[in-house]
Amino acid sequence: MTNPAFHRLRSRSLAILLMLAWNCASQADDSISGPFVPGSGHWNPVKDGSFEVPAGPLPVYTGYPVPGVWYLSLSPGGGSGTADYSADAALVGQGGVRVQPTTFNAPGIALTYGAVIPLTPGKKYVLSGFINWVSPAGSGANTYFDLWGAPGNITLYPRRVPGWQFVYGTFTPTVAPVGIRAGIGNIVSTNDVFYIDEMAITPADQFVPPVQ
């Protein structure tokens, strides 16, 4: 007959192993709230990830990623929204992107750059970006940064705080190339608005976060 204490020990050990596995898969992430010292920090924006382009709407696509352009991605049967280049959405430089749902039906909408960012599998990188999330009281939404085409590598969840924040986390890709997304999901209000600037993927040994 097996000792009940052994079962408790085995269950506890399994729980610890599962917790360790989750921590390894989810990677480390952090958030720094502004204001920030101008010019501080170092990161490598992905192509057009500083959004220094003339004001106007981004294209909207449904379904699979479109390589090489920034666009608003919608899931089939999901919600709709708008994404616009705007100087009013900028924190660094003269341009940023404003994203707002207009209707919502899970799984959400995302500002997306198609899967053409060349990375070296097995090398450590930092995914980062600035976000200003204006969320009404009672909203059940979550905003996130993640990689398109590399599921499980990293997902960052900005904090529900007023003003701009810099969100970043390390990851080690297992596939390449990848895409990048800044999205909103869960229980979303059409009054949930977020602003994005400086979306970047940087080799970890070159990355420096901004200073408050």
Image: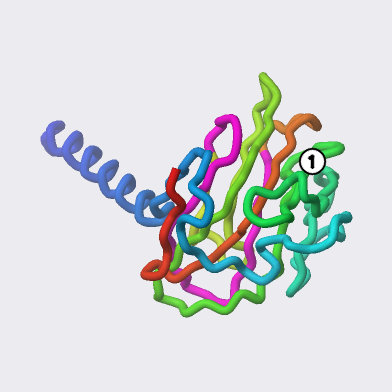
Residue 115's quadrant in the figure? bottom right
Residue ID for mark 1 = 100
Q: Residue at x 79, y 63 (%)?
A: 53
Rendered image coloring scheme: rainbow
Q: Give the answer, above or below, for where 170 lies relative to 100.
A: below
The answer to whether residue 157 of the structure is visible from this angle is no
Q: Residue furthest front?
A: 38
- SS for callout 1: strand
Q: Position of residue 11 (x, y in %)?
A: 24, 39
Which image quarter holds the N terminus?
Answer: top left
Q: Give the answer, above or below, for where 56 lies relative to 163.
A: below
Q: Residue at x 80, y 38 (%)?
A: 105
Q: Give the answer, above or below, for where 211 lies relative to 201.
A: above
The answer to whether residue 53 of the structure is visible from this angle is yes
Q: Residue at x 59, y 30 (%)?
A: 162
Q: Give the answer, above or below, for where 31 lies relative to 48.
A: above
Q: Position of residue 108 (x, y in %)?
A: 74, 44
Q: Residue furthest top?
A: 137
Q: Residues within 10 Å of mark 1 (few under 14, many from 20)?
A: many
Q: Which amino acid, by three-letter code, is at mark 1?
A: Gln
Taking depth in this image into account, of 83 and 96 the one nearest to the observer is 96
Q: Position of residue 54 (x, y in %)?
A: 84, 61
Q: Position of residue 19 (x, y in %)?
A: 32, 45
Report the span colored magenta: 159-185
Which image quarter holds the C terminus?
Answer: top left
Taking depth in this image into account, of 91 and 49 the one nearest to the observer is 91
In the image, is 150 to the left or to the right of 212? right
- Magenta stretch: includes residue 187: no
- Magenta stretch: includes residue 169: yes
In the image, is 99 to the left or to the right of 55? left
In the image, is 191 to the left or to the right of 156? right
Q: Residue at x 60, y 34 (%)?
A: 163
